[in-house]
Amino acid sequence: MTLGRFAPSPTGVLHLGNLRTALASWLSARVRGGRWIIRMEDVDGPRCRRDLGEGQLRDLAALDLESDNPIVWQSERGAAYREALAALHRAGHLYPCACTRKDLQQLASAPHLEDGLRPYPGRCRGQIWEGWERALRCRLPEGSLDWEDRLLGLQSDEPARLTGDPLLFRRDGCFAYHLAVVVDDGAQGVTEVVRGADLRPVTATQIRLQEALGLPRPDYAHLGLVVAPDGSRLGKRAGALGLEALAARGISSREVLGWLGWSLGCQERPEACTPPELLGSFAWNRVPMGEVRVPEAWV
Ligand code: GLU
């Protein structure tokens, strides 16, 4: 049975790009008669806030996108992440990393990759585990990896080129995104990951981590980002493109859904609608691959 998920980080208001991902993941799961869940990815310390997460859930409910299961908050899943780290340690994959941010900047010989991603060059490989006081990285196998993206087709990447050995546990006691996302997709039985194209470059790393933990690989689809009318990144303007801000300008949630559905290739014009009305026309081969521009009038 298909299980799709939407996994926002509660660090702000859901903007049109996030809402588009939520709707696409819902449609993709439902069109196959599958289930769909929401998971709150609030592992990233103080940047994540419960009230922001609750606001995001209200916005999703206003679009009639409701989780089939009770919401999992990653901040409550520390025991599972610790267990996964212990398993990786037993299998010999973990090593403590003493590199500071400054060391990392000096060590990185590769130019900035997409989104400023730099691969970790592995300086602390060979260090011996001493307990939970140190940051922990996972040694991943060399070589490239192929996977099929529902939208983008065959992808081939190498964790070493893109992220290097990922940091899974921070010295301040926080579990890292790569660990939490992989452990929870596995624990919840997620079969389908739909998310923004900004996360495509870390997929190879996450797949290697799934393999190291003996977890099944879900299907992936990476959606083009929503950008400003002139094609630039939304940046700070994204905040003004949440449901509440749009409603204050007279744009209803049905109209937002209509635009999202149109941007996903479900309708010819951005006509106001509900999610179930889009089900009959959703298909991955109709979803445009590139970036989508917000309507001028909405910015
Ligand atoms: N929580 C991540 C974000 O909001 C998304 C994780 C994922 O979909 O894999 O950027």
Image (cartoon, rainbow, N blue to C red):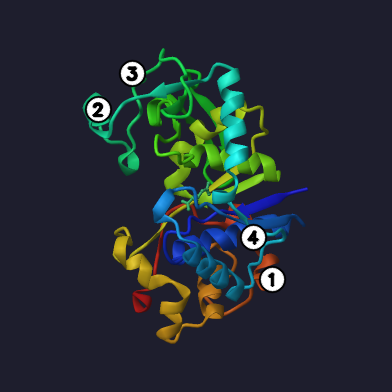
Label 2 CA crowd tier, 10 Å (few <14, some 14–19, many 20+): few
Label 4 is placed on what type of residue?
Trp
Name the quadrant containing residue 105: top left
Q: Nearer the viewer, residue 243 or 154?
A: 243
Which residue lies under the disc numbered 3? 123
Q: CA distance from mark 2 to mark 4?
A: 42 Å
Mark 4 or mark 3, earlier in chain: 4
Label 3 CA crowd tier, 10 Å (few <14, some 14–19, many 20+): few
**Res 103 label:** 2
Residue located at (42% from left, 63% from top): 12
Q: Position of residue 19 (x, y in %)?
A: 51, 64
Q: Are marks 2 and 3 in contact (CB under 8 Å)?
A: yes
Which residue lies under the disc numbered 1? 276
The answer to whether residue 27 is above or below residue 256 is above
Residue behind label 2 places its C-beta within 8 angstroms of ligand 1: no
Q: CA distance from mark 4 to mark 1?
A: 10 Å
Name the quadrant containing residue 294: bottom left
Q: Position of residue 186 (x, y in %)?
A: 66, 39
Q: Dot 3: what SS? A: loop
Q: CA distance from mark 1 to mark 2?
A: 51 Å
Outermost residue toward the bottom in this view: 250
**Res 26 label:** 4
Mark 1 or mark 3, earlier in chain: 3
